[in-house]
């Protein structure tokens, strides 16, 4: 979290993250361009600029596949959450690698000509009516343009400037970029060289991403569909049993409209808040109360239990909900309170605290 | 109700990493680095050789003297000697440029041409440098025999690929195929003579200079077919050691 906009707020995790990422990139490129030609006489005969465009192009595809797998992986198993924490650096580096690939392509295939490079890119091949021979470079150019826009707007300044819903919508276009990359590779390198390994990377990666997204999506939609039970005392809904909430943790209910509500248990009190972090829509209910603040598992944005506001100087806010107990059942009024409304936690009666203490896991 | 897992909770700015998160992340780092290295090896070595096309400095600063022909593209007809038979040498310039502008004023005349060859099998193209690499030969000192007329080898249906003769000969490796299609179009558009890379030899040749049915430059409509496997119909003729494929139609398609 930061109240001011610095290029990067470094910490140990980010340094390790970027270090591993850069090590992977350097290893990939060094092996491709140095060890590859030693192992393969055929590659040795290939022009060095073409070797470089293949190296950076295949690396960009690999990185884009990995970066798209991080989201569903973190939804399926929260231990992958650290990969999500610094995912934007992964995305920015992917855009840089893709741009390097494009630079080698432009500097080789589209150079040394009376036609300017970019003009040549868009005019030299106009076989739009056939699959084989289609100007696949245009898919690559589109994907690169999207990746560059995403990289440039990845900073929290743009998140705040554009507002989270618009920013999130823009950044979902990474899936269009990925589709364009798959078409770019399939209609270009794959049709041209019939490379089995590249085919596996492209379509195996696509299949893997589909499976991961389907599994994660199924889990989410099952939760959305399982709306919390209503009570005769409408509009209150039953979110769960107090015994199911571990200290410092939450359970998550779904209002009839699908809005998710997280109910946290801290020091014998219950507080209900929106499950959606105001930073990047992270799942707050999967977070934890740290030093008295609800802490988002994605990037660690924090909110006060009593009013849903981030501690000064931060200005993020989430909605709060009324909560009460009926026996050991936790009930929530799905009508959100105005942003910033102060509402003290509902105390859990001593007898319930004592009887549920044995059920609570150590968080 | 969704009850989040009780696994260790970690956000990047925390100092302490829970044991289960640490174990998984260490495993992931090992998998990531090993995966990047393995993918790099597999993707790099899984490649086909672009073949033996190469630059050849045959002239070593010397010049070829012959009769300049400009149809369908600039060709220097070099008379035979006791050591080698007559040659018809395709000409191009550096980069994706032809030499039409410089060859046209010399059409039918004796010319002195220097440069570097690019060669692959029976395909040869002389890449002409700037300055005095392409000039009129001194008429007083030069007495060239009239080049022999073209020999008609009849009508052929050929399977192969259209490419620019310069990259196909080895100026780029690989210099054929779909990935090279845009480059081939730029070369041909810039005046580099196009060739047909046949899958089967025609009178011992796999590379044929492409021309229109009337012997002019390759029809522009064929630019949509570069880099692809294609079947073409047309007449083949021979000029010295060069075969010219005068295309009149795409097989099972319309005329060009």
Image (cartoon, coloured by chain):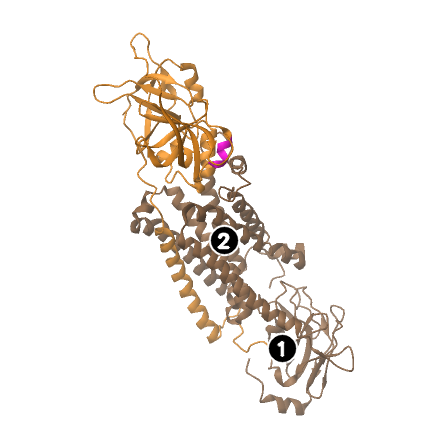
Chain colours: A brown, B orange
Label of residue A250 in the image: 1
- Above/below status of B27 relative to A4: below
- How far apart in space, not on screen, are marks 1 and 2 (Cα)? 35 Å
- Residues flagged by tags 1 and 2 on a common chain: yes
Crowding at dot 1, Cα within 10 Å, few <14 / some 14-19 / many 20+, comes out as many
Nearer to me, A22 or A212: A212
Main secondary structure of the magenta stretch: helix
Instruction: Provide the chain ID for the residue under circle 1.
Output: A
Callout 2: SS: helix
Q: Earlier in the sequence, mark 1 or mark 2?
A: 2
According to the image, label 2 marks what residue? Answer: A94
Q: Quadrant of residue B160?
A: top left
What residue appears at the point 66 percent right and 72 percent down from the top-left corner? A225
The residues colored magenta run B221-225
Is B161 left, or right, of A150 in this rendering?
left
Image location of residue A132, percent across then percent down: 49, 43
Is A276 left, or right, of B131 in this rendering?
right
Q: Quadrant of the N terminus of chain A?
A: bottom right
Is B207 left, or right, of A356 in this rendering?
left
């Amino acid at each position: 979290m930061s109240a001011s906009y610095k290029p990067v707020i470094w910490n140990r995790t980010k340094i390790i993250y970027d270090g591993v990422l850069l090590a992977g990139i350097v290893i990939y490129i060094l092996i491709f361009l140095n060890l590859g030609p030693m192992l393969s006489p055929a590659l040795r005969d290939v022009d060095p600029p073409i070797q470089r465009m293949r190296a950076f192009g295949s690396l960009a595809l690999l990185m884009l596949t990995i970066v798209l797998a991080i989201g569903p992986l973190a939804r399926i198993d929260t231990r992958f959450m650290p990969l999500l924490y610094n995912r934007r650096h992964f995305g920015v580096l992917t855009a840089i690698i893709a741009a390097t690939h494009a630079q080698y392509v432009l500097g080789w295939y589209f150079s040394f000509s009376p036609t300017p490079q970019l003009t040549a890119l868009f005019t030299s091949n106009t076989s739009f009516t056939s699959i084989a021979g289609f100007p696949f470079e245009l898919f690559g150019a589109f994907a690169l343009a999207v990746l560059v826009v995403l990289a440039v707007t990845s900073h929290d300044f743009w998140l705040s400037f554009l507002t989270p819903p618009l920013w999130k919508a823009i950044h979902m276009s990474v899936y269009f970029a990925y589709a364009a990359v798959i078409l770019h590779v399939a209609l270009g390198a794959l049709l041209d060289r019939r490379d089995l390994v590249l085919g596996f990377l492209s379509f195996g990666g696509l299949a893997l991403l589909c499976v991961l997204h389907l599994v994660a999506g199924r889990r989410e939609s099952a939760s959305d569909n399982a709306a919390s039970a209503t009570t005769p005392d409408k509009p209150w809904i039953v979110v769960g049993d107090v015994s199911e909430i571990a200290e410092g943790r939450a359970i998550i209910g779904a209002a009839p409209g699908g809005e998710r509500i997280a109910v946290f248990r801290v020091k014998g009190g219950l507080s209900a808040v929106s499950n959606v972090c105001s930073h990047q829509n992270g799942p707050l209910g999967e977070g934890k109360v740290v030093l008295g603040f609800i802490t988002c598992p994605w990037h660690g944005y924090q909110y006060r239990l009593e009013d849903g506001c981030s501690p000064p100087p931060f200005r993020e806010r989430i909605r709060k909900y009324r909560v009460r107990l009926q026996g050991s059942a936790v009930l929530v009024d799905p009508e959100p309170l105005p942003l910033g409304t102060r509402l003290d936690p509902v105390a859990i009666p001593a007898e319930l605290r004592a009887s549920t203490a044995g059920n609570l896991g150590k968080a | 109700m969704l009850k989040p897992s009780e696994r260790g909770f970690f956000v990047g700015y925390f100092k302490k990493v829970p044991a289960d998160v640490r174990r998984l992340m260490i495993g992931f780092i090992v998998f990531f680095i090993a995966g990047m290295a393995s993918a790099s090896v597999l993707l790099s070595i899984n490649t086909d050789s672009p073949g033996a096309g190469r630059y050849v400095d045959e002239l070593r600063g010397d010049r070829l003297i012959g009769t300049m022909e400009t149809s369908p593209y600039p060709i220097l007809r070099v008379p035979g000697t006791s050591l080698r038979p007559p040659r018809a040498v395709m000409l191009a310039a550096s980069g994706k440029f032809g030499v039409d502008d410089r060859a046209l004023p010399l059409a039918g005349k004796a010319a002195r041409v220097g440069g570097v060859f690019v060669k692959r099998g029976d395909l040869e193209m002389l890449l002409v440098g700037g300055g005095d690499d392409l000039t009129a030969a001194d008429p007083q000192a030069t007495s060239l025999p009239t080049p022999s007329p073209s020999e008609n080898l009849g009508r052929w249906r050929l399977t192969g690929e259209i490419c620019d003769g310069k990259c196909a000969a080895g100026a780029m490796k690989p210099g054929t195929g779909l990935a090279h299609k845009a480059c081939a179009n730029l070369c041909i558009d810039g005046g580099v003579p196009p060739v047909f890379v046949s899958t089967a030899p025609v009178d011992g040749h796999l590379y044929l200079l492409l021309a229109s049915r009337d012997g002019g430059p390759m029809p522009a409509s064929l630019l949509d077919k570069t880099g692809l496997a294609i079947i073409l119909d047309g007449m083949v003729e021979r000029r010295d050691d060069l075969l010219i494929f005068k295309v009149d139609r795409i097989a099972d398609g319309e005329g060009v």
